[in-house]
Amino acid sequence: MLTGKEDLLQALIEAFLMEKGTREFYADAGQKALDPEARKTFKALSAWEEKHMDYIRSLYLSVQDERDLEGFEQFSRHAAAPVTEAGIPVKDLEASLERHSFVDDMGAIIFALEIEGKAYNLYRKMSEKAVDTNAKVVFREMMEQELSHIDYLKKARTALAETP
C-alpha cells in the first residue's frame, strides 16, 4: 500500500499493483453483472485500468532505460494485486459486489463512482505526501486519470437517469 514515502520506482510498482487489482475486480464484476449494460460498463472500466497499467509500465521502463523489460513483464503477470486503486482490498469489493448483485447499469455506475472517487482521493493524498518529486508527478497524473473516469461516469449516470 502506498504511503507517500516511496521513491519513484517503488511508487510505480505500488501504483501498478493497485491498478492491476482494480482491473481484475472490474473484469470479474463485468462477468458477474446481470444487466448487459452493467456488464459493458465494468468491462470498459477494466479496459481503462489496463491502460493505466500500460502507462505505469512505460514510465517504469523509461526510468530503467528498458533494462528490466523481461523482469517487469514477469512481475506484472505473476504479482498478486490484493488492493485496488481505491485502497480497498479486492476481496472486500468482491464481497460487496456479491451482496449487491448489480442488476442494472445505474447500480454499476454508482458503485464504480465510489471506487474511482476513493482512488482519486488516495492518489491526491499520495501526491501531497510524496517525498520524491517524480513520484509526486506520477501520483498527480494518476489523479487526473481518475478524474476523467469520474467525469465519464457522472455523465453516464446523468444520461441514464434521463432515459425514460
Image: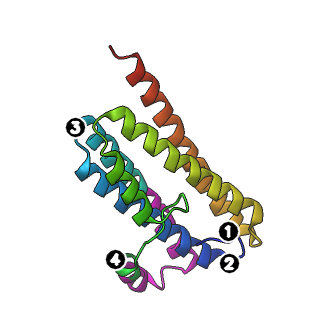
| 119 on left or right of 133 | left
Q: Residues within 10 Å of mark 2 (few under 14, many from 20)?
A: some
The quarter of the picture where the C terminus appears is top left
- Give residue 92's quadrant in the image: bottom left
- Give residue 100's quadrant in the image: top left
Q: How crowded is mark 3: few (under 14 residues within 10 Å), some or many (20 or more)?
A: few
Q: Earlier in the sequence, mark 1 or mark 3?
A: 3
Badge 2 amino acid: Asp
The answer to whether residue 54 shows anywhere in this view is no
**Which residue is at a point 44% across and 71% down the rendered structure image?**
82
**Which residue is at a point 58% across and 76% down the rendered structure image?**
63
Q: Earlier in the sequence, mark 3 or mark 2?
A: 2
Based on the picture, tell me whether residue 95 belongs to the magenta stretch: no
Badge 1 amino acid: Ala
Q: Residue 7 carries which label?
A: 2
Q: Distance between the residues labelled 2 and 1?
A: 6 Å
For the record, the magenta segment spans: 50-74
